[in-house]
Image (cartoon, rainbow, N blue to C red):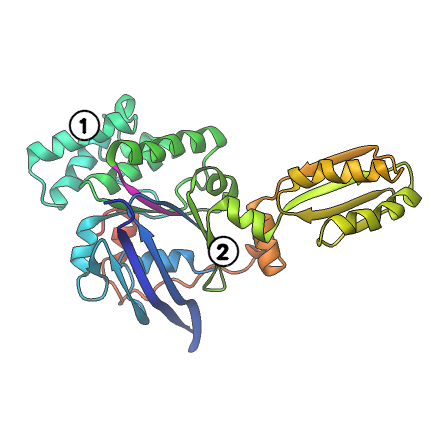
């Protein structure tokens, strides 16, 4: 049912021990995601995104806090969670020597599907994800984009209502990325699948996600749709050019009167960042003209999600991403986690 919670977390926290020192990878993760949403999870390397996904998919246990995923508790009913979700990790799925369709059939058998149901579901996914032209090839013969589509097919083999995608388009060329996104979006249209994904490509989140969650240093620092985040946290950058620095200085008082935003004068140009800049820009031009100040050029540049991160933290996502990656999970925590992450099956 639409708007019914499919993920509910409260105080979810993960602390690793690295060289006898506690490292807080995720702190107090609390949010609710509704059925049918496409949620983009953003943040630099080491922010805690992958650790969060691994906890929600039961690959590693939380240190504290609770979460229910598709109605099942991740602590007390890990098997119930795994049977109701799909997960596509960052590593390539599949046994390299096995053919694509056979790999899908093996996945179906793992989930207890009959041979007949597995065959029907495999053929359905091969068609919807456009795998038909290489369904008889071995996995090792596939391109990067083809392997990622197979990853998603494996994660969807048991028709879960929710799929987690951990940076699904990383390393793909622009054409393969666009193609992959076409298939991701079709999942919602054809199967009503809820999609929760992490990505470093801000243009993807801006264009496709209905909801954007930004994480930094293990905490959620923003949660809204992309348009709202950009309007409230960054704003459009308006820049006005004048004949000389004297005109720019004269214009400063007029522009400051029309907006509460900080106005910056740099030589013969003046700039400011404001919400709904498209409305303010013509007003400024009219007021300056009335004051006898000629505007030689005027531009309005809409904000990006990287501007949002800069406004929140003082850094861009690219700058923030230069740090160390998140610590790996302790292998004893979930004995089969490495296999699960590699194959796309939560085994």
Q: Which residue is mark 1?
A: 123
Q: Which residue is mark 2?
A: 45
In the image, what residue occupies the spot 68% across and 44% down? 237
The residue at the far top in this view is: 133
Residue 67: give x, y in percent of width and height.
Answer: 28, 63
Q: CA distance from mark 2 to mark 1?
A: 37 Å
Residue 218 placement, left or right of 153: right
Residue 158: give x, y in percent of width and height.
Answer: 17, 41
Residue 250 is at least partly visible in this image: yes
Residue 25 placement, left or right of 96: right
Residue 273: give x, y in percent of width and height.
Answer: 68, 48
The residue at the far front in this view is: 290
In the image, what residue occupies the spot 9% across and 41% down? 113
Q: Which residue occupies the foreground of this view, 70 or 165?
A: 70
- Name the image quarter holding residue 190: top left
Residue 344: give x, y in percent of width and height.
Answer: 27, 46
Residue 213 — which label? none
Graded by Cα atoms within 10 Å as few (under 14), some (14 to 19) or many (20 or more), the crowding at tag 1 reads: some
In the image, what residue occupies the spot 35% across and 35% down? 184
Q: Which residues are magenta?
A: 192-197
Graded by Cα atoms within 10 Å as few (under 14), some (14 to 19) or many (20 or more), the crowding at tag 2 reads: many
In the image, what residue occupies the spot 76% across and 35% down? 298
């Amino acid at each position: 049912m639409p708007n019914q919670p499919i993920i509910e977390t409260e105080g979810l926290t993960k602390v690793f021990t690295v060289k006898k020192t506690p490292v807080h990878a995720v702190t107090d993760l609390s949010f609710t995601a509704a059925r049918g949403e496409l949620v983009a999870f953003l943040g630099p390397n080491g922010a805690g995104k992958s650790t969060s996904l691994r906890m929600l998919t039961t690959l590693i246990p939380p240190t504290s806090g609770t979460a229910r995923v598709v109605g099942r508790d991740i602590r007390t009913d890990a098997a119930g969670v795994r049977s109701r979700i799909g997960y596509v990790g960052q590593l390539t799925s599949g046994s390299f020597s096995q053919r694509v369709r056979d790999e899908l059939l093996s996945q179906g058998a793992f989930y207890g599907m009959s041979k007949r149901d597995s065959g029907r579901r495999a053929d359905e996914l091969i068609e919807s994800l456009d795998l038909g032209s290489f369904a008889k090839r071995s996995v090792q013969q596939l391109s990067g984009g083809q392997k990622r589509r197979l990853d998603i097919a494996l994660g969807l083999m048991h028709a879960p209502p929710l799929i987690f995608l951990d940076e699904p388009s990383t390393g793909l060329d622009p054409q393969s990325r666009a193609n992959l996104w076409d298939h991701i979006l079709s999942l919602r249209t054809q199967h009503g699948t809820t999609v929760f994904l992490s990505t470093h490509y801000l243009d993807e989140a801006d264009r496709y996600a209905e909801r954007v969650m930004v994480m930094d240093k293990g905490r959620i620092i923003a949660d809204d749709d992309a348009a709202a985040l950009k309007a409230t946290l960054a704003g459009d950058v308006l820049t006005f050019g004048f004949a000389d620095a004297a005109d720019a200085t004269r214009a400063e008082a007029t522009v400051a009167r029309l907006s509460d935003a900080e106005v910056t004068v740099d030589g013969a140009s003046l700039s400011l960042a404001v919400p709904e800049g498209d409305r303010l820009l013509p007003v400024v031009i009219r007021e300056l003209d009335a004051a006898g100040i000629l505007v030689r050029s005027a531009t309005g540049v809409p904000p990006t999600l990287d501007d949002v991160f800069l406004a929140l933290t003082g850094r861009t996502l690219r700058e923030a991403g230069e740090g160390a990656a998140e610590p790996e999970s302790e292998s004893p925590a979930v004995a089969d986690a490495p296999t699960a992450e590699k194959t796309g099956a939560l085994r």
